[in-house]
Amino acid sequence: MTSRKAGWLAIITLIGLIAVLPVPEFWIIQLNYIGISSLAVLGLILLTGVGGLTSFGQAAFVGIGAYTSAYLTVNAGLSPWLTLLIGMALTATCAIVLGWITLRMSGHYLPLATIAWGLSLYYIMGNLEALGKYDGILDVQSLKVGGWDLGHGRVFFVMTWSLLLLASLGMIHLLDSRVGRAIRSLKTGSQMAESMGIDTLKFKIGIFTLAALLASMSGWLYAHFQRAVNPSPFGMQIGIEYLFMAVLGGAGHVWGAITGVTITKLLSDQLQVLLPKLIGTSGSYEIIVFGVLLVLTLKYAPEGIWAFVDRRLPKAPRKVDWHQAAPLAHRSKPAAGEVVLQVKDIRKEFGGLVAVNNINFTVQSAQIVGLIGPNGAGKSTTFNLITGVLRPTSGSVTFRGESITNSASREIAKRGISRTFQHVKMIADMTVLENVALGAHLRGDQGAVSAMLRLDRSEEQGLFKEAEFQLRRVGMGEYLHELAGNLAMGQQRLLEIARALCNDPALLLLDEPAAGLRHKEKQALADVLRQLKSEGLSILLVEHDMDLVMQVTDRIVVMEFGTRLIEGTPEEIQASPEVRAAYLGTEH
Ligand code: ADP
Ligand code: MG
């Protein structure tokens, strides 16, 4: 039995034991509240911890779930099982609208919008006559199946914790999938993710909605366990407490949710008894203790308490189960001599600075074209214009006969242009293999639901097989299971090349791939580039190592101050007095 399976068995056994042993009713009730809150916090783990998006509005979504079910069961006599679905539909609608409006804008709008959202919902709940104003709705029925009452301590405990464990398992599966890698890439900024073909807005709205749905479910459980609702558990302060629990428990870990909620709950119970004795007066002094605790956590355990435990758990390396996987489909390759890329009069101005000044060049199939020039010449900007990271001021880019001038990054990736970045962009806490599999995002199509249900395994095997193949090809076969953050600079660059190759590109753009590589590694890189060329791939290469450039390129474009200085074969460039002048600063 694997250690993971043993862990699950232990948890399930524990829940069973708590349910049948004479555990005092008080503790069962505490555990029920912990389970209910953990569902809402689990949503924040996904949204904030993994996706890097902060929401203060999680409690408001709990409120929607709770109030929808309370109102419709009491006033319309609907079954709670139906109102669960209605509540979730309402929650999803609100989350998608709110997410669609705010997530298109930069990072700060979501926290601000969720504050506004949380506050306004709180006042709506508190002021609407139909919702009972600040008294709320009383006499909510308990959950029943047939005639069987689920609302009582132990039965409710088993139901809530089963639901929580299922949600946690689904989350673990989700994060370990094609969709999960896309979600984990959101934190590194959208540029890299989009260039892998990932629609970052869609995934941001997706995790915001999923987090809200978990909150809604938590609210539904709360309403039918408490048998009443009022606005106070759904206010802004509770929204902040949920965030606190996630950070304390370990915002990047699924088990951080239960950890954070349990510690907070137990501690606040103790403090409520202890502090008045110490201080002599009663009041909400535990808030101060929690504030101090949060600062200490952020300073000494920024990854939260679960991260400590997690580091000490035995971990088996990923099982290599993809050798039998069917190879992925390939795109049609350009014919010999086909013009793959045509850059025409492309220009980019940043304010008064002309970074790229009407540049022209073409790349044919199976050709390696070098783009060289001193620092600041406009090489990386040219890359960004070709790959849709920047919009050109004027000019056009044509790829395989079709204009991609104003296309988005991910559209361009879809058509078969892959790139690496001058400043490496990878996910440090993901393995090398997973980072590279991210590059194959467009070659899979399994979504979130199939990932949660583990129906995506055969596609995953195909993606991993491809990732391993590309890593071995660039000489990184030894590092498959290493965390990307532990790699040396040169290896990180090789990781980026392997990731770019996973998209099965027709054109590969490499921005200073040899920077940080040792001599032998550079020779190995030159061999890889020649091999790729022999397979029909076209490469545009920005590189300062002239030995490498002269060895592998067919043609070279020299840029200086945004302008094309000269274009020619390596021999012509080497012989050119203008190039010497540009590089050495001598008069020619
Ligand atoms: P290279 O890659 O050849 O070293 P870059 O393309 O990075 O050069 O930069 C070309 C010029 O454009 C530099 O002067 C740089 O400062 C400027 N530049 C690049 N990106 C931006 C930007 N986003 N905003 C303003 N100026 C920029
Ligand atoms: Mg550059």
Image (spheres, rainbow, N blue to C red):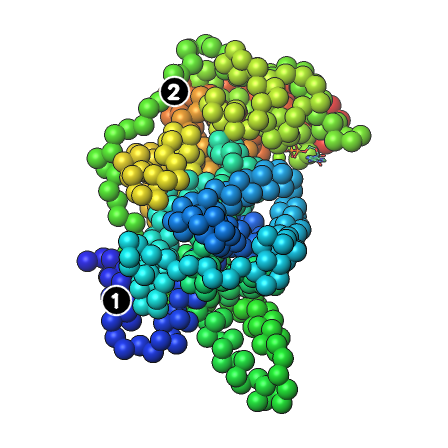
The type of residue carrying mark 1 is Gly
Q: Is residue 556 above or below residue 259?
A: above
Which of discs 1 and 2 lies nearer the camera? The answer is 1
Q: Is residue 433 visible?
A: no
Residue bearing the label numbered 2? 331
Helix, strand or loop at disc 1?
A: helix
Q: Quarter of the image holding residue 141?
A: bottom left
Residue 23 placed where, x, y %? Answer: 31, 77
Which residue is drawn at the image coordinates 41% and 11% (left, top)?
Answer: 335
Residue 420 placed where, x, y %? Answer: 51, 34
Residue 16 numbered tag: 1
What distance separates the C-alpha of mark 1 from that of mark 2?
53 Å
Residue 173 placed where, x, y %? Answer: 35, 47
Which residue is drawn at the image coordinates 29% and 71% (left, top)?
Answer: 18
Which residue is drawn at the image coordinates 62% and 47% (left, top)?
Answer: 110
Q: Quadrant of the C terminus?
A: top right
Helix, strand or loop at disc 2?
A: loop
Ligand 1 rendered quadrant: top right
Q: Do the residues labelled 1 and 2 touch (CB within 8 Å)?
A: no
Which residue is drawn at the image coordinates 57% and 60% (left, top)?
Answer: 136
**Which of 159 and 469 lies nearest the eye of the viewer?**
159
The type of residue carrying mark 2 is Arg
- Which comes before the other along the chain, label 1 or label 2? 1
**Which of 74 and 433 lies nearest the eye of the viewer?**
74
Q: Is residue 103 above or below residue 71?
A: above
**Which of 186 and 280 lies nearest the eye of the viewer?**
280
Q: Quarter of the image holding residue 32?
A: bottom left
Residue 463 placed where, x, y %? Answer: 34, 35
Q: Residues within 10 Å of mark 1 (few under 14, many from 20)?
A: some
